[in-house]
Amino acid sequence: MNRLPLSFALAAAGALLAACASNAPPDRFYTLGGGDAAAPAATTAAPLYIEVLPVTVPAQVRRSQLVVTEGPGRVDLLEHHRWAGPLPDEIGRALSLDLSAALGALDVYRTPHPSGSTPYRIGTTVQRFESAPGAYALLDATWSVRKAGGDAVLACRSVFREPVGEGYEALVAGHRAALAKMAAAIGAAVRRQEAGTGGC
């Protein structure tokens, strides 16, 4: 019986693996913050300080892969479409950038800030973060604003459902739009607290 030399068999296996690898789709990475963030608002007043606290998201979407809704009670994990960083960090960074721009503020979370300054602490808990390709991007979150050292806490809820076109870029853009709207709502609440009027 003729047997293939071991070196030939190994070479054939390597060629087969290389062919499979070349046919694999490339990995795509997406981010929710940066790129199209607005420039900070111009102001001559003393800077406003905020602390955007770590964001909490549901366990089922706390993954590196995009989790998409494919029908009632069914989701798919997209192995080759991933977030550039952990989803809670992506959401928190987007909120920080949008709020800093809208308020002309400095996010000093875990950063030293001037003595006597009183940052507004902003907490966010995402209840739903749904991604339906070609249909919608949904953000449902509760958020709170509290001035450091104070007892009064403003707690509110925002729900945004953005229609999206085909493609995962459009889906991510829908989530960015929803986050920008939520940041605008939070920023308005901070301004009202500054003015002493309060309310969501």
Image (tube, rainbow, N blue to C red):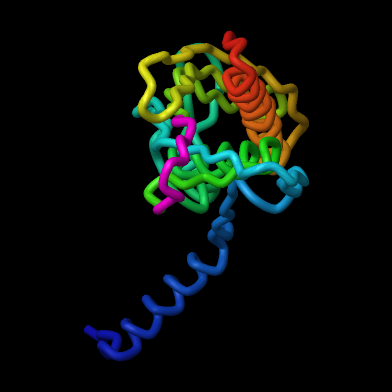
**At 59% from the left edge and 24% from the top edge, which residue is drawn?**
190
Residue 53 coordinates in the image, percent (x, y): 41, 36
Vertical order, 189 against 149 (above or below): above
Q: Quadrant of residue 17?
A: bottom left
Q: Is residue 115 visible?
A: yes
Vertical order, 183 against 92 (above or below): above
**At 61% from the left edge and 46% from the top edge, which residue is drawn?**
33
Q: Quadrant of residue 181?
A: top right
Say which quadrant the N terminus sits in.
bottom left
Closest to the observer, 7 or 146: 146
Say which quadrant the C terminus sits in.
top right
- The span shown in magenta is 112-121
Question: Most extreme residue toward the left, as rendered?
Answer: 1
Q: Quadrant of residue 68?
A: top right
Task: Indicate left or right for 142 with 2 as reference.
Answer: right
Closest to the observer, 115 or 175: 115
Residue 159 coordinates in the image, percent (x, y): 60, 14
**At 42% from the left edge and 15% from the top edge, which residue is drawn?**
153
- Prevailing secondary structure class for the magenta stretch in the rendered image: loop
**At 67% from the left edge and 18% from the top edge, which residue is drawn?**
161
Question: Most extreme residue toward the front, as rendered?
Answer: 116
